[in-house]
Image (tube, grey):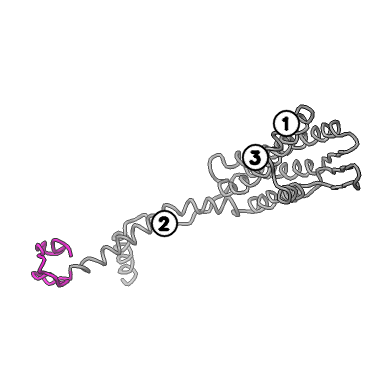
Amino acid sequence: MAAYCPKCNYKLKLTDWRPECPKCGVNVVYYGIEDRLNAEADKAEYEHAMFQPKVDRIKSSFIGDNIAKTRIVLCVLPVLASLLSMGSITMNVPFKETVNIGWVSIINVVTLFTDYGFDINAILAAIKYEPTRMAFVWFAVALVGLALAVVTWLVGLILLTLSCSPKGIQRNITLAGMGIGFATISFIGSVLMSGAMADVFPGIFSASVSPLALIGFIVTWGAVIAINVINKKKGITINYKDVSEYLIPYEERKAQKEAAAVKADA
């Protein structure tokens, strides 16, 4: 129980166990609850009004107009490019049939590691071993480039929601360019790795690297860059929801509504 009555400021004693003030009779617990609820509602509405513009900007960034919607579609296309062939691998193991892994895509790479595990220690050991050093260095470069390309795509897709920020369009273009760069690094690493592996294991390991996946990445991310350049020149129109009334304190809004009602009746 409160130490003082909120209405008459009477000092309450331990013996005053009833909810009513013994002096003025007001319910100490519920006195002024309507004002408190109105104040809390006023605070919640004010916070909503301050946050609403951020929601409007995110919405306009993502699905605000046809350009934004087209950008979403184009940003998904690199996934399809990742399914294209990056090359083929053939291993002719002595006393066994030739193992033809066939065309390789990101799906094959992920499946290979999930089925057989990714032993970083084995790769490091192969890098330290002189005959296989360069082959596995380029193998590591190809893997890291591929992984960074995938991460860049995911980050770019998430950050589409921030396209309306001051540097949002520039960031979209930069991430798409980085994706092309990492895919190119992965392709170069694959070419050099396949040649080095064939030199280390002549007649056993042979591989051919296809530029098809790289071309797919360049085309799809190039389209993302193009749509962002168009968006930059055109500008992004943000449709802000009018919540200005919630920036006015509750009592003032209430008085304005009552005054408007009286004026309408008159």
Rounded to the nearest angstrom, the CA distance separating label 1 from label 3 is: 36 Å
| In the foreground, 91 or 105 | 91
Q: Are marks 2 and 1 in contact (CB under 8 Å)?
A: no
Residue 223 in sight here: yes
Reading the image, the residue beneath label 3 is 173
How many discs appear?
Answer: 3
Please report whichever mark, 2 or 1, sits nearer to the chain's N-terminal start: 2
Which residues are drawn in magenta? Answer: 1-27
In the rendered view, would you say 119 is above or below 251?
above
Residue 81 in sight here: no
**Image quarter (top left, top right, bottom left or bottom right) of the C terminus:** bottom left
- Mark 3: few/some/many CA within 10 Å (<14, 14-19, 20+): many
What residue appears at the point 75 percent right and 48 percent down from the top-left corner?
Answer: 112
| In the foreground, 89 or 18 | 89
In the rendered view, would you say 3 is above or below 222?
below
| Residue type of the residue flagged with mark 2 | His
Question: Picture coordinates of residue 203 (x, y %)?
Answer: 91, 36
What residue appears at the point 34 percent right and 69 percent down from the top-left corner?
Answer: 264
Our reading of the magenta stretch's main secondary structure is loop
| Residue type of the residue flagged with mark 1 | Ile
> Does residue 218 appear to the left or right of 2 in the view shown?
right
| In the foreground, 165 or 266 | 165
What residue appears at the point 85 percent right and 43 percent down from the top-left corner?
Answer: 89
Q: Is residue 3 magenta?
A: yes
- Mark 1: few/some/many CA within 10 Å (<14, 14-19, 20+): some
Question: Picture coordinates of residue 106 (x, y %)?
Answer: 75, 47
Please report whichever mark, 2 or 3, sits nearer to the chain's N-terminal start: 2
| Residue type of the residue flagged with mark 3 | Ile
Question: Picture coordinates of residue 30 (x, y %)?
Answer: 22, 69
Reading the image, the residue beneath label 2 is 48
Reading the image, the residue beneath label 1 is 127
- Secondary structure beneath dot 3 equals helix
